[in-house]
Amino acid sequence: MNNFFFSNFSRSYILFLVIFFSNTLPAFSETGVSVFMYHRFGEDKYPSTNVSEEQFYSHIDYILSNKIKIIGLEKLVKMLETNQILDQKAVAFSVDDAYSSFYKTAWPVFRDNGIPVTLFISTDIIDKKTKGYMTWEEIKKFINEGGTVGQHTASHLHMPLNNVSKIKNDLLDSHKSWIKNIGFIPKLFAYPYGESSNEVIDILKEFEISHAFGQHSGVISNFENKYYLPRFSLNEKFGQLERFEFAVNAYSLDIKNFLPIDMFLTDNKKPLIEFSVINNLKGNSIDCFSNPNGEWSMQELTNITKNRIQIKLKNKYLSGRARLNCTTKVDEKWYWFGYQFLVK
Ligand SMILES: [Zn+2]
C-alpha cells in the first residue's frame, strides 16, 4: 500500500544508489530532515505495516554507528514555525497507531538509546481497550519515560472524504479523550492514511494546529508545506537497509508554488503539475516518477522558465492515492521531493 517510487524496471537504479551511498556519505552541511514512520514491529502477519525486528535494529544501528543527527518532531516543528534554518542533515522518528508491538519491541530501544520518538494515536481504539493496541496506562508510562505523543483523530478518520462537521466532531472527540486520559492535547498532528485536502487544512487551522504530517516520501526543509510534511514510510518491503540509508542521506529538493493547489483531486484525474525549484541544480536535471494508470513510470518534464517545471502526465491517475517523487543529484548528493494526491 505504501509505495516507494522504484518499480521493477528501475531496480538497477536503486542498485546504483546503494553502491553510491556505500562508498560516499555526503557531508552533513545542508538542510533537511528525513522523518521516518513505522507502524508495527515483528508482526509478520501484516507485512504492509510491519518491519521485522532485524530491520528495525539495523536502522537504529545505522543511525547510531554513523552518528547521524537525530531530532524530536516537537523540536522540528518549532524550528519550522520560527523559520529557523535546518543547517544540518538530521533524522526524526515517528510511529503511528500505538500498536502493542511498538511498546514491547521498539520503545525500549528508542528509550534506552535516548532517541526521541513520537507516537501518533487515534483515541477511540485506545478508549475501546482494543486488543493489540497500547492501553492509556502504557501511553502514560511511555510519556513519563520520555516519549512524545501526537494527534491522529479519534476514529482514524479518512479526513478529506468526510464533511466539515464530521471532521470537527471527530477532532473534538479526540481532544476530550486526550484531556481525560493524559491531561493535555498534543501539539503534533498526523493525518490518518496521510490524506488531506485544502478543506481539511482550513479546519486544522481553526483548531490551532500549526502543521501536520502526511505519509508521502520526502525530506523536510523550511520550504515544505507545513500542513503536508512528508515522512518516509517503513514496512517489510521498504524497510531494507539500503532504502533506509538512501532516505537518511537524501537532501531536500526545495519546491515552491506547487500546482495543483489542492492535494485532493475531486474533478480532474490528469492534473497539470507545476512547481518552481529553489535549489541551485548547477545544470543537473530532475527525474520525476509517478503512478498514473497505477503503474510507476518516469514522467516527461518541461521547463516553462529556468526554474519552473511542468509535468504533463501521459495517463490519468486511478482513484485512490497517487504519488509523485522527484530526485536530482547535485555535487554527488541526492535531493528528494515527494507528493501524494488523493484522487476521487
Ligand atoms: Zn494511522
Image: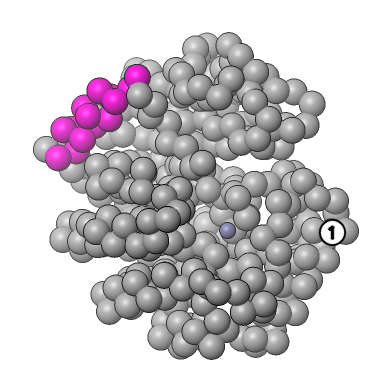
Residue most extreme to the right? 165
Residue drawn 68% across the image and 30% down it: 319
Q: Position of residue 50 (x, y in %)?
A: 41, 55
Q: Name above or below for residue 74 compared with residue 291.
A: below
Task: Give amino acid for label 1.
Answer: Lys
Q: Name above or below for residue 56 compared with residue 133.
A: above
Residue drawn 31% across the image and 34% down it: 334
Q: Name above or below for residue 95 compared with residue 294.
A: below
Residue 21, magenta (yes or no): yes
Judged left or right of residue 165, residue 69 is left
Judged left or right of residue 142, residue 149 is right
Q: Classify 10 Å Cα crowding around label 1: few (below 14), some (14-19), many (20 and above).
A: few
Residue drawn 35% across the image and 70% down it: 106
Magenta segment, principal secondary structure?
Answer: helix
Instruction: Tell me if I can see residue 253 in this picture.
Output: no
Q: Nearer the viewer, residue 341 or 31?
A: 341
Q: Nearer the viewer, residue 137 or 185?
A: 137
Label 1 beta carbon within 8 A of ligand 1: no
Q: Which residues are magenta?
A: 9-22
Judged left or right of residue 261, residue 57 is left
Residue 294, magenta (yes or no): no
Q: Secondary structure at mark 1?
A: helix
Q: Which residue is mark 1?
A: 166
Q: Quadrant of ligand 1?
A: bottom right
Q: Position of residue 150 (x, y in %)?
A: 57, 69
